[in-house]
Each structure stands twice: as C-alpha cells, then as structure tokens.
Amino acid sequence: MKTDVITVDNKGDSLQLALNRIEGLANSVTKSDKNGHYLRLMAEELFGIVSANAGDFTAKFWAENQNRDFRIVLEADAKELPDEAKKDLLSISSTGENSEDQGIMDKIGSLFCFFAKGGNAANVKTFDCGYNESSGDISWSLKDYKSTIKNKNLDASLEELSKSVIANIVDDIKVGVKDKKVKIEIFKTF
C-alpha cells in the first residue's frame, strides 16, 4: 500500500495531513498504535532535518509498505549538479569528523541540501557516497556509513550514532540523486 503523495513545503503546509496518513498506514498494517507513532516520529524527524537545513523548499512526502516493511520518502527536484560539485562530493572525507554538523540527522539534512541545491561539499564532510559516472546518480546509506565507521574504529562517530534516537530505530536511511530528483528514504520493518 501507499499513502497519498502529499506536497509539503518549509512552512509545514500539508505536513499534518502527510503525517496522519503515514501514521495511519502503519496502524492499519501492523494493528499497533505504537508502530504508527514510531513511523510518525521518523517522518517528523525526516521533515524536520530537511526544513532546518533547506530554507525554502517544496517536496513530495509519502510512505509505502510491503507487508511489514515500510519506506518513508521525501523527494524534491535537484538542481543540476555541476561537474565540480560532483568531484567535490566524491572527495568527501570519511574520517567521521565534522565540526559544522552536530548529529547524524544534521549530517543527513546537510547532505540532502547539498544534493538539492548543488551546494558546497564542505557542508557534508563525513559521508562516503557512491557515484555512478555513466548515469550521474549519487547515493549515501546509513548502513554503509555505520559499517565504514565501525571498520575504521572511529569512536567519536560511533558514540554519536549510539546517541541518535532515529539512527537506532530505523533500519536504514538512504539519500541520493537520480534523474534530477533528490530523495531521502527511511526504511523500517515492524
């Protein structure tokens, strides 16, 4: 099933409608208000990180499921990324240190804004992103990020992740650009 695709903006127009539909989807599928509240919390956090970082924006917001596997999506048009910005993105450090962003959700919000506005890679220094040269697609995944920092024994980043409520309740978060659309997806299985 899929909720209605609702257009939201930085002012919060239509946000409550989108959140109610997302919560309702989880409630009806899992027969649990608790799961509905969790999915709503994830959707609120997703919207919050984007609105805190993006300034003026308009995006499509929805959730869908297959059985008990849920996906929350926020999708916006991406400005054409100049070749230099793509190269900058490929050179983003994976040291786990970023003095500008305080938590993982801030980093994800900065990454979304980088993709959406073709911004400066200095805003998102801690991401290992995949890049497909032939298609121009760019992607980042929370699962991959966790694996990278564990493999490199980056204690500060591991501690930061352990403190993040969202990072501990979602199964994965993906951020990417494809076909001139920037998308954040949150995945959760109940």
Image (spheres, rainbow, N blue to C red):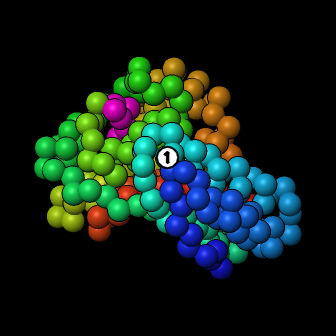
* Quadrant of the drawing holding the C terminus: bottom right
State whether residue 146 appears in this view: no
> Residue at 46% across / 61% down in the picture?
59
- The secondary structure type at the circle numbered 1 is helix
The residue to which callout 1 is attached is: 50
Question: Residue 126 lies in magenta, yes or no?
Answer: yes
Q: Is residue 158 above or below residue 116?
A: above
> Residue at 61% across / 76% down in the picture?
4
List x then y, in percent, for residue 75: 45, 62
Q: Quadrant of residue 66?
A: bottom right
Q: Is residue 148 left or right of residue 161?
A: left
List x then y, in percent, for residue 106: 50, 35
Q: Is residue 128 above or below residue 6?
A: above
State whether residue 186 appears in this view: yes
* Quadrant of the drawing holding the N terminus: bottom right
Highlighted magenta segment, given as a residue range: 123-128
Q: Is residue 68 left or right of residue 117?
A: right
> Residue at 54% across / 61% down in the picture?
8
Magenta segment, prevailing SS (helix, strand or loop): loop
Question: Residue 54 lies in magenta, yes or no?
Answer: no
List x then y, in percent, for residue 47: 57, 50
> Residue at 41% across / 39% down in the picture?
110
List x then y, in percent, for residue 130: 31, 51
Residue type highlighted by circle 1: Val
